[in-house]
Amino acid sequence: MDILSLETFVESTLIALGQYGFILVIIFALIHPIFEGPFALFNLGLGIYIMGAIPAYIIIFTANVIGCVFLYLLVKKVDRFSNYYLHKKKVSGNVITWLKETKKWKHIFVLGVPVIPTYPVKIGYLLSEPSFKETMKTLVGMYIFLFFANTLIFYGILNFLETGLARILSVVLLVILVLFVYFGKSIFSKIGLVKGES
């Protein structure tokens, strides 16, 4: 979906919803942290068209933060209900431990990257037993970064992320960037070891 078709879709949605469109924006913003859908860029565009830029940013961000609280409570409740099942399994337990030991800024950056799905990382991070305060710092930081990136896409500065083959290429490059943020240091240290041995 390119920016023009997004604008057309938003306009037709607005006509159908009339004066109640802002309610849909709030609902989408509340459920986005829990399901990573609907598409954050679409909801931002819809909010800007209905309410104007500043009210849309404030209302959507506030609803996103409330959704993050719901997500935190939901994940903790399901984790307790399952008797900490994923913590006890070898692979998932190791992943959860790794996520716990990884620096917070890396999670903020990776979770806030637009266009690519990061839901498993977000759930794994929440299972890594951060406190509520630490979780909210990370998720709020993630949404600030996501808002910044989606703003650049919405206003056409990063328009290439939403068009044809360039979108596929940009998604691949963003995935590589995410992997680099998490594993770049270990990759470079391994390359250094290999060079040292030769």
Image (cartoon, rainbow, N blue to C red):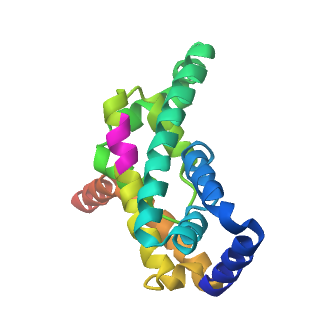
Left or right: 150 in relation to 188: right
Asked if residue 181 is among those painted magenta in the image, a careful observer would answer no
Tell me what residue is drawn at x 63 percent, y 46 percent: 35
Residue 182 appears in the rendering: no
Left or right: 163 in relation to 158: right
Query: Is 69 placed above or below 88 here?
Result: below
Query: In x, y percent, where is residue 12?
Result: 74, 77
Q: Quadrant of the C terminus?
A: bottom left
Magenta: main secondary structure equals helix
Picture quadrant where residue 193 is located: bottom left
Question: Could you say which is closer to the camera, residue 5 or residue 75?
Answer: 5
Left or right: 26 in relation to 142: right
Residue numbers of the magenta segment? 135-140
Picture quadrant where residue 97 is located: top left
Picture quadrant where residue 3 is located: bottom right
Query: In x, y percent, where is residue 194?
Result: 30, 58
Furthest-top residue in view? Answer: 83
Query: In x, y percent, where is residue 106?
Result: 33, 51
Tell me what residue is drawn at x 58 percent, y 84 percent: 166
Residue 42 appears in the rendering: yes
